[in-house]
Image: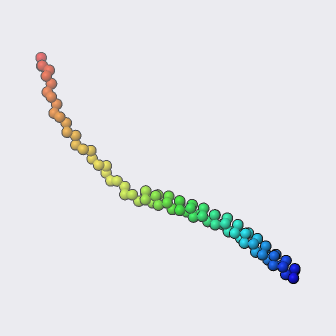
Amino acid sequence: MTDVLWVLVGIIIGSIGGILGISLVSAGRFEDKEKEIQDLRTQRELLKEEIFRLSKPKRGKPQPRKKRYYRPRKPSNKSSK
């Protein structure tokens, strides 16, 4: 009877240890995947901006300046000799 009890205790302790070991290993993998997903999202946003910047239509000729209206010059009041 005591042998069966020790086997059951060993199975319980072994299953708890196995569950803890698997959870620790999978937690590290999960963290790595989350970092990779975040890096890919950042890269996608940067590429979107680059595509948008490159696809903007280029300007043609520059817009002409507005016409400048000059006031007529006053005749000079110098007396001719």
Q: Which quadrant would residue 22 be assigned to in this image?
A: bottom right
Quadrant in which the C terminus appears: top left
Residue 27 as seen in the image, left or right of residue 45: right
Q: Position of residue 11 (x, y in %)?
A: 79, 77
The image quadrant where one finds the N terminus is bottom right
In the displayed image of the protein, which residue is found farthest to the front?
Answer: 1
Q: Quadrant of residue 12?
A: bottom right
Instruction: From the viewer's perspective, tell me whether residue 24 is left or right of residue 61.
Output: right
Instruction: Identify the residue at horizontal 56%, vertical 61% (top origin).
Output: 38
* Up/down of 31 relative to 60, above or below: below
Q: How many marks?
A: 0
Residue visible at 34% across and 53% down in the picture? 59
Q: Residue 55 at what x, y percent from top left?
A: 41, 59
Looking at the image, residue 47 lies above or below residue 11: above
Identify the residue shown where x is 22% and y is 43%: 67
Residue 34 in the image: state x and y as whole percent.
Answer: 60, 64
Where is residue 19, by image quadrant? bottom right
User: Outermost residue, right direction?
Assistant: 2
Q: Nearer the viewer, residue 37 or 18?
A: 18
Q: Nearer the viewer, residue 63 or 48?
A: 48
Is 3 displayed left or right of 75 in the figure?
Answer: right
The colour mode here is rainbow
Q: Image point 19% across, 39% down: which residue?
A: 69
| Horizontal side of residue 27 vs 47, given as left or right | right
